[in-house]
Amino acid sequence: MKKTEEKTTGQSEVKKANGMKRRSFVKLLGGGVLIFFKPWNAVDLLAMPQQQRRSLTKDYNAFLHIAADGTVACYTGKIEMGQGIITGLAMMMADELNVPFEKVKMVMGDTELCPYDAGTWGSQSTQTFGPAMRAAAAEAKAVLLEMASARLGVPVSGLEVKDGVISDTSDPKKSVTYADLVQGRKIEKYLDVKPAPEDYTKFTCVGKPRNRVDAYEKVTGRAKYTGDLKIPGMVFARILRPPSHGAKLASVDISAAEKIQGIQVVRDGDFIAVTAENKDKVDEAIVKIKAEYTFNELPVNDKTVYDWMVKADSRASVVREGGNLEAGKSRSEKVFESEYHDPYVAHAPIEPHTALAHLEDGKMNVWASTQSPFGLQDAIVNELKMTRETVRVRTPFLGGGFGGKAAYQQGVEAAKLAKLTGKPVMLVWTRDEEFFYDTFHTANVIKVRSGVDKSGMITFWDYHVWFAGTRGAEIIYEVPDFKTTSYSENRSAFQVHPFGTGPWRAPNNNSNTFAREVQIDIMASAAGIDPLEFRLKNLKDEKMIACLKSVADKFGYVPAKTPSRRGIGIACGHDAGTWIAEIAQVEVDAGTGKVRVLRVACSQDMGLCVNPEGALIQMEGCISMALGYTFSEEVHFEGGNILDRGFDTYQIPRMSWLPKIDCVILDRKDKPPKGGGEPSIIAVGAAVANAIHDATGARLYRTPMTPDRVLEALKR
Amino acid sequence: MEETISFTLNGKKTVLKTDPSQTLIWVLRNELGLTGTKWGCGTGFCGACTVLIDDEPSRSCQMPVSDIAGKKVVTIEGLEKNGKLHPVQQAFVDHDALQCGFCTPGMVLTTVGFLKKNPSPTRQEIIEALDENLCRCTAHVRIIDAVTDAAKAMKGGK
């Protein structure tokens, strides 16, 4: 169903459509063509943290605007954090509206200019938002064609559009530009149609590699991140932090800090901060505050956490089930039982959480590095008892997110400080705070029991996952008797995590893919079948089969039983609607336990590939970033005390770790686009673990595979 | 206690009256408005704050501003000349050798300093030169390719 209303210039009141309120951003825009659309579906809602969900069903969450100067702008609450949607989404718009790419502008992450969006995560921007945006663009084009038809006296069927100019196909001199058409007009349409797949043969922009639009700004230092902003009278702040999570302030002495010239100490109960115009002074002052704490910590650390989690009073739910496990087991020639462990992992973006807040004439203006500007807006409204109309959040460029900036504590803190001091406050978390308050990828335990019959077919699959959710937890192979059980936190009965946890690039799929694909490798090896052949034999999923075959081709894979001593490992899976298969080759130093990845090949089916350049960058990035959780990244802790608080002990991938990377994108132009920011990170850990086994015969059941753990496995 | 510090900043004589104990990065960002120099960890590990001091890539978060008296400082803002990108910047653009871009100024300046010393580096030498600069988006492959191309382009320009 499509609702349309047309308004002419000069009318200030616009009739409410679908319960939608007239909003400030529409007033700010003046004339032009406005198409409102709803990019939501059920998947988005599930991916969204509960407390951040707003009522979405009656609302329009984005709109497209064709301005009187011919500029096409898409206003969205999504944000750019390096993933490249600022380029990819603009390409989709340029194609649909037949305007030059340069004429398209993305206006992102401003709670006042952009309609509501819960946040940027889950590889949703291109696959969910993109098609809806494109449908809106198609609608805008239809409106413009009708206007041109009236203006030129030519039926719509006799018109064509090129570079924002509509002309008569039989008399090209008879033409009018988008800009001329919208001049002095105001047209609003509310689009309720479901986007239809596009005709890829007509794309001129989509499908062709395009470099990032933000590269020039970023290589010259012109790109503005939150910390680069400055308001007259701005002060920097540091907040007094407890030594560990769960610690309570018992006593405090601020006298020494107060004596420092230029320092203002701010206090609101246990919330204590220092501010000054000089950043070095706040760093000097904060350590002069003497504070004592009482501790009430959970008796758990990074070594005991796995037992702790399995014993926790958790909620069990059966994700999927089929056949009969006992029947499957009785048909088995061999049965395998394994337990896999995965630790807490930090996001560690190079830009720490940063926010600038200024309360002026009752209005709180906040700029913050967050993946959820609207979530932050709501949090400030709640914390400071304000209204949505009086809180505006803007998101400049983000210096990385990876899920970690779905959390926005720093924005609330900066707003609170702005209110307490009456000054604009810049809060830049230290690296220590960044680690301490990170919402880590959660540690997890996965136990798998499975079997194979004489012919190498998987007979049953009994999969139990503690605290790694369900993403990637389903068996992708054809198994007659299977069950997946997921155990999740039951906060009312038992607190499992001593600190914050949250989504980390491809949330939990790395863990589930690791357990599944290592278990598959164990069975293939025991059955004496080449691991690629074993997978193909047990798969019916055509996309998975195609990815495996193409990655084997790219790698130049020669079948062999494992361990073949060649150091080659395979793994596959799917995430965010995209299918991937990876092959890794490693070299293991048996003396030191150090593993070096020589090569990774990856094949990916992501449906229509909007920007092959952008997709390739994301694949390379996923593979390189995965080396961190594979080899080094693990948050050590004792109770609520985070022991890794810097890049000295928490090692992230470096140049010298890089393997040769070969990527293949199986471009399915006739299929809708799927997620590209996360999928190829999921299988690297398993491919490397399987490669280590292939090289040495040693089996690793946990990440990260540090030299010590490799040595230990070699000794077993 | 304020002091007067004279130095060359991006080719221009600069005289600054400031607290000499401040770290260079905050003077650049907060007093001189050169926010291209990024603050990533404050402990010298990540390299986002790298600037050139007398052509040597240096961590500006680890240096009191008094240390630069009489020296030549180049920040990311000082590389573009007459609207033309430095060959290293251009190579980063051409190779899409960045994602979020937060480590980029440090990567570019480390590269500029490195290529001054070693205009014809091997791939291994490039890796070693940039190994202490962290990039979390992991654009590493492209950064190495960009540096390789920049080295070629700069020799061609001589």
Image (cartoon, rainbow, N blue to C red):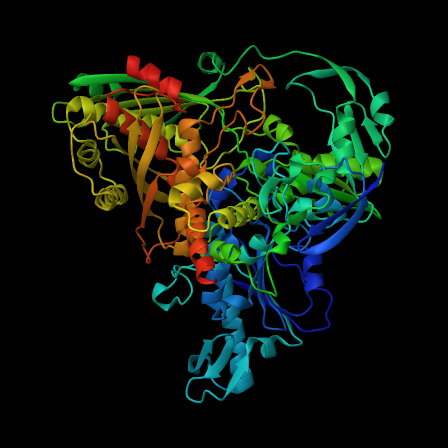
Left or right of residue A8, residue B140 in this image: left
Lateral position of residue A191 relative to residue A666, left or right:
right
Q: Is residue A442 above or below residue A415?
A: above
Please name the residue shown 25% across and 30% down the image: A567
Identify the image quadrant of residue A583. top left
* Viewer-side residue, A400 vs A367: A400
**Residue A83 can be seen in this image:** no
Residue B133 locus on image (x, y percent): 52, 39
Location of residue A86 in the rendering, given as x and y in whole percent from the top left corner: 53, 55
> Does residue A197 show up?
yes
Instruction: Give the camera-side residue of A187 and B89.
Output: B89
> Can you tell which quarter of the image residue A597 is in?
top left
Decide which of A159, B153 is in the foreground and name it: B153
Relative to A266, say whether A658 is above or below.
below
Nearest the camera: B9 or A126? B9
- Which residue is the extreme one toward the left? A455
Corner quadrant of residue B12: bottom right
